[in-house]
Amino acid sequence: MKRILSFLLAAMLLASLPGCGKTEPEEPPAQPAASAAAPAPIPEPEPEPAGPAGTNPLTGLPMEPEYESLRPVAVMLNNLKAAQPQLGNSLADIIYEVPAEGGITRMLALYQTLEGEQVGMLGSIRSSRPYYIELALGHDALYVHAGGSPEAYQDLSAWGVDNMDGVNGGSDAKIFWRDKERRKTMDYEHTLVTSGEKILAYLAEGYFPTEHADGYDYPQRFAEDGTPTGGTAAELVSVKFSQYKTGVFDYDAAEGAYLVSQYGKPYTDGNTGGQVRAVNLLTLETEISQISGDSYGRLRVRTTGEGRGQYFCGGKTVPILWSRKDRNSPFVYRTEDGAPLTLGQGNSYVCIYSPKTGSVTVS
């Protein structure tokens, strides 16, 4: 009996042991139910960087406020065919083109600021005449030139014009030099240049006040779109100054500006190779006559008083009236009904001519 009990006990112990080399898998612990993942927050769009808070008084475009009250710089540019290309002309805020002796024209290019624009070289620089000085004074500008007629030198002195002279200047002459590259292909007279950097460095020495006096105001109005209401089509404009020079302005709708040509080819900036463009084109009629007894055929050009003209913008044109109280006042432009003319935001090209020797053709 004892042996039977021992046998049964041993059998029970063997049955309770696991099988050969195997273990029973354990029940994995229950996992808590996963909660639904919250959607990732949508990032806020970064705000557009704010543009300059000031306004360029010559173009109506935004600019840094510290430049608004600066006196612009007015530069005399040589426009003989043999002197092309000009340098720095495409960055001018306003270009005035006016006949000079012999049927040629010269440009007076105005820059509200030379700061931060990388204007580079400017030129070639040519001599002064009284009516170019008057145009510069109308903007209270600092005037850059290279020499001048006897009458121009008298006026520079009598009118107290703040000017930098590349021919008969004193310390200001150091901002000019003869460009070696231009000397390879051009006559010596077409090689005198300066630069935005040189002018700024000279002005920083304190020779002239660089800001307008308190109370100065340039009254021109601007709008984002200056296309004249009720204007007639003006896709192609030809301005004949003389038998020697005709300027051509071809409206480019994609650019929103007139592309300028002269001497049968694009009018370009030698610094960039780009064609000069103008958002606003103005043609002003005036009296132009040869100075009696002047052996060089120099001209007298009326820039004050009143006159008629045309305004072109957005491929349209309207007749306008211009007036100017005196040589120290800016041009005032009005429509024929007497309302102030609003220009488009952007640069302007102003052609001053005599209907007796020139004309404007529109198509």
Image (cartoon, helix red, strand yellow):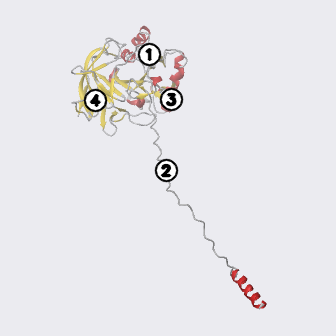
Q: Nearer the viewer, residue 324 or 276?
A: 324
User: Would residue 4 be found to the left or right of residue 227 on screen?
Assistant: right
Residue annotated with mark 3: 179
Q: Earlier in the sequence, mark 3 or mark 1?
A: 3
Q: Nearer the viewer, mark 3 or mark 1?
A: 1
CB within 8 Å, label 4 to label 2: no
Residue annotated with mark 4: 312
Q: Nearer the viewer, mark 2 or mark 1?
A: 2
Element under disc 2: loop
Residue kind at label 4, given as amino acid type:
Phe
Q: Nearer the viewer, mark 2 or mark 3?
A: 2
Residue kind at label 1, given as amino acid type:
His
User: Would residue 311 be found to the left or right of residue 54 on screen?
Assistant: left
Residue annotated with mark 1: 212
Residue annotated with mark 2: 40
What residue is rendered at 75% in x and 91% in y? 4
Mark 3 → mark 1, Cα distance in angstroms? 33 Å
Mark 2 → mark 3, Cα distance in angstroms? 62 Å
> How dense is the environment of label 1, judged by Cα within 10 Å: few (below 14), some, or many (20 and up)?
some
Residue 241 visible in the displayed image: no
Q: Earlier in the sequence, mark 4 or mark 2?
A: 2
Q: How many marks?
A: 4
Q: Which residue is outermost to the front?
A: 1
Q: Earlier in the sequence, mark 2 or mark 3?
A: 2
> How dense is the environment of label 2, judged by Cα within 10 Å: few (below 14), some, or many (20 and up)?
few
Q: Position of residue 229 (x, y in %)?
A: 23, 30
